[in-house]
Amino acid sequence: MNTTTALPPTGDASATAPGSRRSTRRAPWRGAQHAERAGRDGGYSLLEILVSLSLMGTVMAAVMAAMFSAIHASSITDNAADLDAALGATADAFGEALFVPCPENVTPNAYQQYADVGADVHGWPAGTVSIIDVKYWDPLAAPADAWVDANGISGTECDETVWLSTAKTMQKVIVQATTPDGADSRILEIVVTDVRPES
């Protein structure tokens, strides 16, 4: 009688030849890959963290700079609008102003009351819109038609009821408006006159 022994299929990795022992040793390259993966799974290196923080700091600095620039630009725009409104109100008030031949003889300046109208528009403190100078037109000064510091009117001529010549009845009032925080200011020049026919 013939006896046959069944052999395992070819290619079965679990089968070993009789009397042999299966090896469990791993290839060296597989162990290195496993160690590398294990190291990466453990977190980031100090160098990687420092690089990330440096990049984040650069981005945040750029964003903050842009934000502060936008805020500053907005503040400047608001200040400019407020100053324009204050000076506009002052100019309107001067439209109703009475000519004062000798404003320097009045303290504060005789025209300051009209400048205060500009400050009142925003409820600003007194003095934020003020008269900083008054120039007087003198056709005889060099160069011709020049604005001078000295008033050509004095004495009894300072009485507003006295007729004055055209050459002595033009003044340039210089008004300065400054925001309450002192961050910005503007200047307006207003010419006032009292040209009347000789009586």
Image (tube, rainbow, N blue to C red):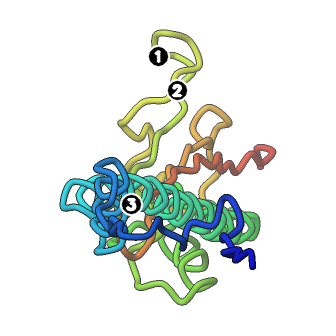
Nearer to us in this view, 64 or 166: 64
Identify the residue at horizontal 38%, vertical 63% (top origin): 183
Nearer to us in this view, 18 or 133: 18
Give the label on residue 141, or none: 1
Instruction: Name the residue tied to disc 2.
Output: 138
Q: Position of residue 72 (x, y in %)?
A: 49, 61
**Residue 111 placement, left or right of 170:** left
Q: Quadrant of the N terminus?
A: bottom right
Instruction: Name the residue tied to disc 3.
Output: 56
Indicate the secondary structure of the residue bearing disc 1.
loop
Q: Earlier in the sequence, mark 1 or mark 3?
A: 3
Looking at this view, name the residue that lies furthest to the bottom.
Answer: 123
Q: Amino acid at mark 3?
A: Met
Binning the other alpha carbons within 10 Å of mark 3 as few (below 14), some (14 to 19) or many (20 upward) gives: few
Identify the residue at horizontal 39%, vertical 48% (top origin): 154
Q: Earlier in the sequence, mark 3 or mark 2?
A: 3
Binning the other alpha carbons within 10 Å of mark 2 as few (below 14), some (14 to 19) or many (20 upward) gives: many
> Do the residues under discs 2 and 1 have CB atoms within 8 angstroms?
yes
Indicate the secondary structure of the residue bearing disc 3.
helix
Q: Position of residue 68 (x, y in %)?
A: 46, 63
Identify the residue at horizontal 34%, vertical 58% (top origin): 52
Q: Position of residue 89 (x, y in %)?
A: 69, 71
Q: Amino acid at mark 2?
A: Asp
As displayed, is residue 124 above or below residue 67? below
